[in-house]
Image: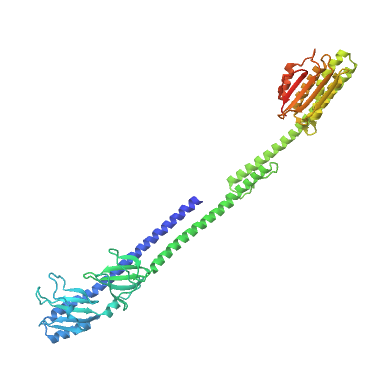
Amino acid sequence: MAVVVIPAAALIVLLAYSIYTSALADIEVSQATAVRGRAASFRSWLDAAGRSLANEAFAARYVGTDKCHNLAETFLRRNSGFASVSFVDESSAPCAAGLPIDASRLPDSAPDGEAADYRLLLVGGQIWIVAVDPGGTSANRTLCVLVVDGAALRDRLLKVGTLGEANVALSGPASEIVAVDASSAQPEWAPAQFPAKEPVWRALDRAGNAATFAWAAIEGSSLGLLMRFDDRRLAIAQHRLAILCLTQLAMLGLLALVYVAAIRRDVVQWIQGIETAARARDRDPEGGARAPVTPSMPRELRSVAESFNAMTDHALERAHALRASLSENRALMLEMHHRIKNSLQVIQSYLALIRRSAAKPEAALLARIEARVGVLAVAYRLALTPNGIRPIAAKPFLEEICATAIGGLRKPRQRVAYAIEWSGELAVDRAIPLGLGLVEALIAAFGAFDVSYIGVRLAADEDGAMELRVESDALPAEADLPQKVMRGLANQLGAEAIPGGGGEILRWRFHP
């Protein structure tokens, strides 16, 4: 979702910003056009007045003084917006109308090569339109003057306001403010300095406020027109940028939310249902948790959920079948072990009965067989439980083996002592080799000549290992230990056979 939404949002912002920059460029173009248009209009007004001044100056040059004065007054009445005018009559005497003109500020002559009939001068903060006297020579020309009225000039500098004009001023050659639409000659709204080549720019005014300014030169003069624009159009462009961005981003966010809700409704909730069922199956395999399946699910997810439920049902059926089979196998195993135990006990009892009625040599042989069979019978009897086979406690197991073997194998005047000091347990497949090894050692000990004492001991040594020792006071004679059998029993028990000395018959060391 983020891969789609974030690039789309970035593209929307870039598009809105490009529209915003285009709007700013249009605003600057319109502001530059506005200041150039006002400058052209100002120039057209002055140009019309200058041409009229040149024409009237030509006429005044050929009339007398009285007519020249009348001509000046008539000219001033016809052309509004001017404070005073001065011509030169046929006698080269000046004739004027309106406010007095300080003739000392007039240049002595027009420069050589002046092509225009008039020119604009800035004299004492006033605009003078100066026309060349056509009657003079190129070396000594007298000039005619038309002075622009300050009130009319300020009226022409009033803001129009169609493009957000806030203030308009006339600037001189040194970028000073010559005239404004108010009485102040150096207003606070003017910029601190003019850029060299930019017609429209943003800067701080003299009061420290940011604003947009535009400037255009008045053609044919050293004057220029300065405009300050308010930020209404800039604010409108910024608002449009914000509205465009926010609207598009809101729509994108709404689409994202709808998409997320649809994905959650049509995909995520069903996947979560399958996941919940899978986790429940992991915690409780026999619980039978099932994934939700409804007609409103997407076809693919419904297929997955149905497959999951089918696998769950199949696993439960297999678990029930395996449990039933295991129960049957356990029952068969218990029955088998029970029958083995009973059979061994029957064999042991049968051997005991035959031994009692048999001749002495045959009775000794039967006693040895009975002792060996007794190990298996005792082991199965102690290990077998209703729940299965359990480990055998070593102490009662070995004590019963010793008691059984002694009862059948001991001869008169033979003394036997046994001490089983370990109360731990052994698995059946290790307990039986231990018992058989003990029986073989006892058989060998009882079969020795002139034996009067036999000792059996099972105890722990210093390292924590168990040590089984069988010893007597005489060496074996006819019945020695079957070494091959004893090695096999020791390997099955995991015991180490330690060579004995003196009367030791058996010495095994093993770890529980």
Q: Residue at x 75, y 22 (%)?
A: 507
The residue that appears at 33% across and 68% down in the rendered structure is: 213
Name of the residue lying farthest toward the right = 357
Q: Is residue 396 above or below residue 198?
A: above
* Colour treatment of the image: rainbow
Q: Nearer the viewer, residue 113 or 442?
A: 442
State the residue in front, 7 or 508: 508
Asked if residue 321 lies left or right of residue 352, the reply is left
How far across and how far down the image is residue 473, in percent? 81, 18
Q: Is residue 246 above or below residue 433?
A: below
Determine which quarter of the picture holds residue 348.
Answer: top right
Is residue 493 positioned above or below 197 on the image? above
In the rendered image, the quadrant that contains the C terminus is top right
User: Which residue is at 41% across, 67% downward?
Assistant: 235
Image coordinates of residue 272 in percent, x first then y, are 61, 48
Count of marks placed on residues: 0
Residue 18 falls left or right of residue 496: left
Q: Position of residue 127 (x, y in %)?
A: 23, 76
**Quadrant assignment, res 190:** bottom left
Where does residue 489 sit, x and y in percent of width and height?
A: 73, 21
Q: Could you tell whether 496 is left or right of 376 in the image?
A: left
Evaluate whether residue 343 shows in this view: no
Residue 280 seen in this snapshot: yes
Give me the residue at 70% from left, 41% from top. 286
Residue furthest to the bottom: 66
